[in-house]
Amino acid sequence: MLCDECREHDASVHLTKLVRGEVAQEHLCAQCAAARGITTTVTTPKSVLGEFLHAVQQQEVTDASESTRCSFCNMTLKDFRTSGRLGCAQCYTAFEGRLRELLLRVHRHSQHQGRRYMPPASHILEQATTVGELRDRLQRAIFNEEFELAASLRDKLKDVE
Amino acid sequence: MFDLSLLPEGGLKWLHGTGDHRDVVLSTRIRLARNIEGIAFPSRSREGERLRVLQLMKDAQPHVAGLKGAVLLRMDQLEPNDRQLLHERHLVSKELAGLEASGVRGASAVLVGESSGVMINEEDHLRLQAVHAGLAPREAIDQLLALDREIGSRVPYAYHDEFGFLTSCPTNTGTGLRVSMLIHLPGLVLTKEIGKVLSGLQAMGLTYRGWYGEGSEVVGNFFQFSNQMTLGRSEEALVDELQRVVRHVIEREHEARRVLWRDAGYIIEDKLWRAYGTLRFARSLTFDEAMNYLSGVRLAVGLQLITGLSVSTLNKLLIFCQGAHLSYAEGRVLKDHEANIARARYVREALGAESPEFTGHSDGPQSRDT
């Protein structure tokens, strides 16, 4: 069956339309249907990540930049290209130039315009870090069966809390 | 199975079906992605680091007014059906629920409050979220930014002067904000106008997803419209832009419903009655069937063919007819065919308990048939 519109291609989209309660059939080829904005099925768009990874892979690659490593989490640009996820906040500094290009491509901007952030008042931060660190050290001590050390760490933790 | 009654409002306050444009917009959801300075992101972190993130949030919670009464659930200590159930309630993502191939991540958790909460050790350390009924972007963003200020004053966030809030995936960098509105568009689907709406949406840099969020299929004509870009605009601007578009789509949906009713009233009326009849009397229903018929009944309520059936009952049916919810109600994990029978029984009883009134359309198509 030929397309009702162009009469050139095979019709692959068959529409049943209701006009004032009357049923009307229309047969269109894929191109003419698309030109009229008709989609046949409702499907979700490809995941953002898919398009994004494509953008990542489109970036020009030079051997030197590929082997740049984040000093904090040890991630390389190559790892990032594979997973699409960064390893830590430091990666943004380690791969700053590349990431700026990518952010511009994805968001059309690289300068944040939202609310600014002020880190917590230093004393709260200091306390949080100390408590957290003490807990980490305590757990390590228990794991290593260093019970004397564990006991003193527990006392110190109580004091701080 | 864990005790669901422990959750404040079951984490489902939005089901009450209040809010603007509740006949079309089910909910407005916003999340902010945040990470903690000095700790590797969850996908690259060790268990000890993730436990540290969890502990920081546990320490912060008593001081955060926005998390008062919120309940902490360790995902890695829940049974699969319970994790699935939280996902069905849209309280946790598929990733956090451990429903993806990689399974459940150690030290992953969720804080569930009445209308807000925090996912912990998801793709980012923290995903703050707020959900409100209907079209309520202002309420949601105000609540969420207040929660963000409180948590951010206790826990040091990873932040960069140029790039903003730093996230595991650069598609979230900047504000870390994703606003999504769950909307019901049967009119646009039936009139086949939906394709134009969806391509217009994408041309504007927005996107849409299915019932279960990213990567899920559209069922029952329910779409989640959301922003895609997160950097270079303020939080308010991102939310306002989606709101503007959704308001326009709501108008087009109403217009499509008017056209359907005017031009094909008797077909529509028949279709919606069949949907109601099936739900009211069927003995076995698959999830997709139930969603499609519930979409029909929802449209019938919107067209005032059925009155006295509340939006909150319809919302509740959408959530409680899902597999893990049926298993929870039965006290054991149901196989698919058992779930279909349990679903039909649940829907039948829920509709049977209501006493709706049914009307035809006086100047509608009935007169054409006679």
Image (cartoon, coloured by chain):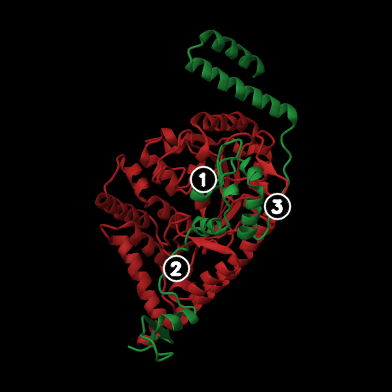
Q: Colour of chain A?
A: green
The answer to whether residue B18 of the structure is visible from this angle is no
Tags 3 and 1 on a common chain: yes
In the structure shown, which secondary structural element does the residue marked by tag 1 occupy? helix
Quarter occupied by the N terminus of chain B: top left
Q: Dot 3 corresponds to which residue? A: A112
Q: Residues within 10 Å of mark 1 (few under 14, many from 20)?
A: some
Quadrant of the rendering where the C terminus of chain B is positioned: bottom left
Q: Amino acid at mark 3?
A: His
The chain containing the residue under callout 2 comes to B
Which residue corresponds to the image point at 62% horizontal and 41% vertical from the top-left?
A89
Amino acid type at image mark 1: Asp
A127 lies above or below B31: above
Residue A79: which disc? 1
In the image, farthest residue toward the front: A63
In contact (CB < 8 Å): disc 3 and disc 1: no
Given residues B188 and A131, the one toward you in this image is A131
In the picture shown, does residue B200 fall above or below A14?
above
Q: Which residue is mark 2?
A: B299
Q: Colour of chain B?
A: red
Q: Nearer the viewer, residue A154 or B337?
A: A154
